[in-house]
Image (spheres, rainbow, N blue to C red):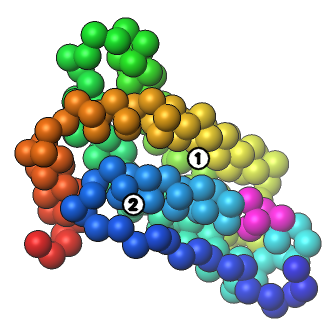
Amino acid sequence: MPRGTPLPGFGAPAVGFDTPFEMLLACHERVKRSLALQQRLRAYLQTTGCDDSARSAARDVLRYFDIAAPLHHEDEERHVFPALQAVQDEGLRAAVARLQDEHVAMALRWTRARSALLALADASITQFSEEQVAALAAFAAGYAEHIQVEESLVYPAARAAMDEAALQAMAQDMRQRRGAPQ
C-alpha cells in the first residue's frame, strides 16, 4: 500500500435479533474480517509505517474484540451450549466442553493482543515488537477451528434442540444485553 492509503475497515451483513443463529453466524463473519484487518495492519506497519490509518485500524480491531466478541461468547454460553447439555451424543458434549475452554483461552490471549493494539492506537508505539506480533498471531490462530466446529456441528445441533420459545428467549436476551430497541 502506498503511504497515506487508508487501511480499509469492514462492513457487516445486516441481520436481526429475530434470527439469533444468523446473528451468531454474522458475528463469525465480523470476527474473520477483524482478524483479517489485524493481519493487514501488521503488513501495513512493515510496508508503510504507523500513521492515522494504522491507528484507526487498531482501534477498529479493539472495538470489535472489546465489545462485540464478549457478547457473542456470552450468547453461546447462555443459550447455545446449555441447549446441548442433555444430548446423548458424547462427541457433541465433548465439543461443547472444548469450546467453553477455548472461550477462556481466547479471553487470555486477547488480553495480550489487546495491549499491543492499544499501544499502537494510543501512539505509544509505531511498530509491533516480535513478542507483540506473536501475541497477535496466537490470538488469531485460535479462531478458525473454533468457528468451524461451532458452525458445522454445534449451531445446527443447538438449533434443532431449541423450540420456538427458546429461540425467542434467546433473541430477546441478545437484544436486551446489547441495549437494542424492542
Tell me if residue 159 comes above or below residue 176 in the rendering: above
Q: Is residue 131 above or below residue 150?
A: below
Q: From the viewer's side, name the closer residue of 167 and 32.
A: 167
Amino acid at the residue labelled 2: Ala
Please give left or right for residue 54 compared with residue 144 in the image: right
Query: Nearer the observer, disc 2 or disc 1?
Result: 2
Magenta residues (range) = 38-43
Quadrant of the snapshot with the C terminus: bottom left
Q: Percent x, y for residue 76?
A: 32, 41
Q: Where residue 79 is drawn, which disc sits there?
A: none
Whole-number angstrom distance, CA of label 2 to CA of label 1: 18 Å
Instruction: Please identify the residue farthest to the left as the structure is shown.
Output: 165
Q: Residue at x 81, y 48 (%)?
A: 130
Residue 15 drawn at (x, y percent): 35, 68
Label 1 CA crowd tier, 10 Å (few <14, some 14–19, many 20+)? some
| 169 horizontally vs 155: left or right | left
Point out residue 89 in the picture as x, y percentages from the top left corner.
34, 12
Q: Earlier in the sequence, mark 2 or mark 1?
A: 2
- Amino acid type, label 1: Arg
Q: Is residue 106 visible?
A: no
Helix, strand or loop at label 1? It is: helix
Q: Which residue is mark 1?
A: 112
What residue is pinned by disc 2?
A: 68
Above or below — where is 130 with respect to 85?
below
Q: Is residue 133 found left or right of 106 in the rendered image?
A: right
Does the segment drawn in magenta span residue 3?
no
Residue located at (52% from left, 47% from top): 111
Q: Where in the figure is residue 140, as x and y percent of width and height?
A: 64, 46
Near-viewer residue (152 or 120):
152
Which sits in the foreground, 37 or 181?
181
Kindly indicate whether the residue at mark 1 contacts the one at mark 2 (C-beta within 8 angstroms): no
Q: Give SS at disc 2.
A: helix
